[in-house]
Amino acid sequence: MDFEATLKKLNTLVDELERGGLSLEEALKSFEKGVKLTQTCQAALETAEQKVQILVEEHGLHKLEPYDDSDAQ
């Protein structure tokens, strides 16, 4: 499953949990699935970051700086 599809499933799970109406058992299963989906997304993002870092280094570009979105708002 690709990143976008995984993220969409995660968003759907979050929406279901926020709406409520699930039994405790169903909510716990959904939460567990959400944790696994989150881990999958995080791994995909880390892999992408590593690939970008390798490309930057291979092409002699400037060092990457962490993104700070505090000024974006």
Image (cartoon, rainbow, N blue to C red):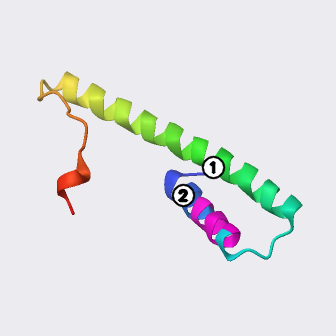
Q: Residue at x 56, y 64 (%)?
A: 8
Q: Is residue 71 above or below residue 41?
A: below
Please name the residue shown 59% across and 43% down the image: 40
Give the amino acid type for the residue marked by disc 2 in the picture. Leu
Q: Write the start and end of the magenta stretch as one range.
A: 10-17
- Return the x and y of residue 64 as percentages of the image width and height: 20, 32
Disc 1 crowd, CA 10 A, few/some/many (<14, 14-19, 20+): many
Q: Main secondary structure of the magenta part?
A: helix
Q: Position of residue 69 (x, y in %)?
A: 24, 52
Query: In what element is the residue under mark 1?
Result: helix
Label 2 sits on a secondary structure element that is helix
Is residue 57 located in the magenta-colored stretch of the structure?
no
Foreground pick, 10 / 4 = 10
Contact check, label 1 and label 2, Cβ < 8 Å:
yes
Residue at the disc numbered 2: 7
In the rendered image, which residue does mark 1 sit on?
Answer: 37
Quadrant of image for the C terminus: bottom left
Rendering coords of residue 38 (x, y %): 58, 47
Q: As shown in the figure, which amino acid type bears the numbered disc 1?
A: Leu
Residue 46 as seen in the image, left or right of residue 72:
right
